[in-house]
Every structure is written in structure tokens, then in C-alpha cells.
Amino acid sequence: MENSREKTQKKPVRLIAAVCNDMGIGKDGHLPWKLPSEFQYFLKTVTRVSRPGKMNMMVWGKLCWFSHPETLFPLANTLHVVLSTKLKKVPDHAHFLSVDFESAVRLSAEPPLADLIETIWVVGGMQVYKDALSHPWCDLVYLTDVMADFECDVFFPEFDRGVFKLQERFPQVPSGIQEEDGVKYKFQTLISQLVCDHLSEMENSLEKMERKPVRLIAAVCNDMGMGKDGQMPWNLPSEFQYFLNTVTRVSRPGKMNMMVWGKLCWFSHPETTFPLANILHVVLNTKLNEVPDHAHFLSDDFESAVRLSAEPPLADLIETIWVVGGMQVYKDALSHPWCDLVYLTDVMADFECDVFFPEFDREVFKLQESGYRHDYGTMLTDADGSRWEVEVVNVYQPPASSLWTHKSSLSLL
């Protein structure tokens, strides 16, 4: 089974539930409490995706599915799979039937859905939760603690709290005790110890290397779009010159920066862009057999590129790692513990795009009002004479106090 999973696109498996004092989750096929704000939190969480066009998969047991009113559906950004060995056809408002949880996971992780689905959300009932908790792809449990006693006949399964660790704070999860209709509750998030161990191993390994600042730089329009058909949808020469000035800046002669490119991003740039002063280029790809023209290195993934810059013979040469796209490379960089700054040009206009900058937690990366070298509120002109007001550049920095949150939780979002 493990070898078969390796051939699929791994998806985060996440559970979400609300439980009362004795871990009850339902009575006679219904929630035993009415907490509208808590339910809105549930909906907002399971329908959140990183960019338009992506979807999440919601996995339901049969009884759980039929206990929900039809008025709940459709839900934005979601496909629904119902688990049953007896149903002969897909229920109304659902999209798929699967015989068991593993089949539902495979459905989301293999073609044709593999490139569409971001997250697998498990919403009950008890046996489905139990199967999901034991799945190797399960990384998070979102568990609302309803701080009261209710009569229940269905319960959330027991799980090892030495394996799933309660987090004091977590991105996009409200903190503190909430109250509705006299019932107090609090939102909780538990993270798999396997994920924590992986992050700890990565941190220990990184401590042995010469740390380099990882910085992202991009220009985005109103909906966070940054490209269309492999090209920028705008022509802003001054903004592009700002980009070049920023990524090629070093502290003294003889030092270099490393620019990290995804393959598609690299080949979308004209050859006239190169060479760039003070820059070594690494292209990320597992299929290219030779280093592309004008590039210097190939790496399989972002972590390999970071190691390349932080270990001999490049460790004494490289000052800064600049990440210039595409979307997955940005996403990997945002979750890296060495990521300290995001330089984001806000192109204040609407453009049609098919590539988007990934969502990031703006409670983790804080917008800096001053203290960085940038032109703020510049008016730039494109090729046809139109003028766009551009904030060059919004600089986002994670506060030192949130470093642990940054490096552990953003990698899971």
C-alpha cells in the first residue's frame, strides 16, 4: 500500500469536528447544540483554498451525509464523496461514492482529480474519523471543544494525544473562549507528532548549515494573479527595474545571491534577461537532464536548492536566496524556517491571470510600513501609456515571536 501511495499526489488529510465534554458529536443524527458562529467557522475552514479553480474533497460517512439538510448544499470549492458499500448511486448533491476511506483518498490523489484537489476534509461519522486518524497523510485535527454536557449517541473516537499535539495558537483559528446562547466553546487545533518530528529533523539539519535569508519577490494584481499563459499580464518597466535592482544587490564585491526558479517560470523569461550581475541561478525540476542555458544549477526541490547555497563550496559566496516563482516554489519558500521577508508589488488593477501567488497568513507575515529600501506609492506607466498606481513594494516580515508558528504551521496550510 505504501508503494502505491508513493505514485499519487500526497494530499493533507484533516479532520474537523465539534465535541462536548464527553467527546459526543451527535444525537439521533443531529448536532445536539446550535452554535451558528461555530458552524460558520466550520464552513469557512473546509471551503478555503489557495487560489481560484482549486477544490477540497469532503469525505462523509453515509449516515452523516443524510443527516445534513439539503439547504447546506452546494458548498463553494468542495467536492463531496460519500462512503458506503450499499448505495447504488451517488446521492443528490454529492459527487462520488467510495467503498471506504482509502478509496476516497486515492480518488483525490490520482488523475483526473489530483491536480484539482488541495485538501481532504473528513467530517464524520465516527468510523470515518477513526480511519482518517490512522492514515499516514493525516496532519491536523480541528476540534471545537464545546464546554458543556449534552446527551449524545455518537462520539469522536479516542486518539493518542501523544501523537496529536494541541497547539496554543494556529493560523486562521480564533483564540480564546467563545460563547453563543449561553454555551461556551473554544477552537482547538492538534498537529500530528509525525509532522512535528519531520520539522524538528529539518530544523536540526539546517542548524548545521550556514543560514541564508530566504526572500520572496513578486508582483501581483488585485486578485493576487501574477501571470497569464507564461507571461506577465502587464508591462511595467520601472517595476521590473526595481526587481532587478533588489535581487542583484549584495553587500560587497565578490558576493553573490542565488535566484531560485521553477522550470516553467525560468523558460517563460526571455534570454535577454540574462546574465544578471551578482547572481547564480538554480532551476527546480526532476525531469530535466541538463542545466538550462544561462542557469548554473539544477535541483530536485526547494530544500535542495537551499542546501546548495548553505553548504560548501557556495556557503561563503552566497548572501541571499531570492525566490522568483512559480506558485509552488513560492509556497515551499513561505513555509521554510529561513524565510524572513516577502517583497510584494501591489499592482492596483484587474488583469486576467491563470497563475496566482499563494495565500499566506498575514498574522504571521506582518506588513512593514518603513525601514526597507523601496519606493512607496510610485506611479508606473505601461507600454500603451496607461498608468497604474503601484505600491513598490509591500514588505512582509514574520515577527521573531512567531517564528515557530511560521516554520511549523504554514507548511501545512
Image (cartoon, helix red, strand yellow):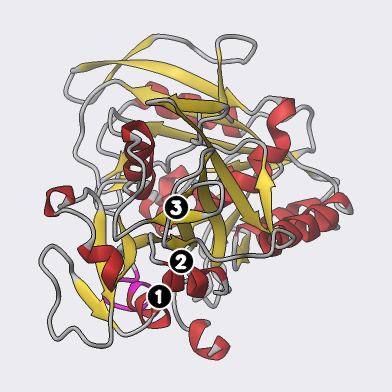
Q: What amino acid is at disc 1?
A: Val
Report x, y in % for residue 94. 17, 66
Label 3 secondary element: strand
**Label 3 vs label 1, nearer the camera:** 3
Residue shown at 83%/50% (left/top)?
315
Question: Marks 2/3: CA distance?
Answer: 19 Å
Residue type marked 2: Lys
Give the label on residue 105, or none: 1
Q: Is 151 situated left or right of 372 in this image?
A: left
Q: Nearer the viewer, mark 2 or mark 1?
A: 1
Where is mark 2, residue-wise? 11
User: Which sits earlier in the primary sequence, circle 3 or circle 1?
Assistant: 3
- Disc 3 crowd rating (10 Å Cα; few below 14, some 14-19, many 20+) is some
In this picture, is 132 found above or below 176?
Answer: below
Crowd tier of the residue under label 2, counting other residues whose Cα lies within 10 Å: few below 14, some 14–19, many 20 or above: many
- The majority secondary structure of the magenta stretch comes to loop
Which residue occupies the foreground of this view, 189 or 145?
Answer: 145
Frontmost residue, 311 versus 209:
209
Identify the mark at residue 17; answer none if there is no mark.
3
Q: Is residue 138 above or below residue 314?
A: below
Going by the picture, which residue comes out furthest to the right?
208
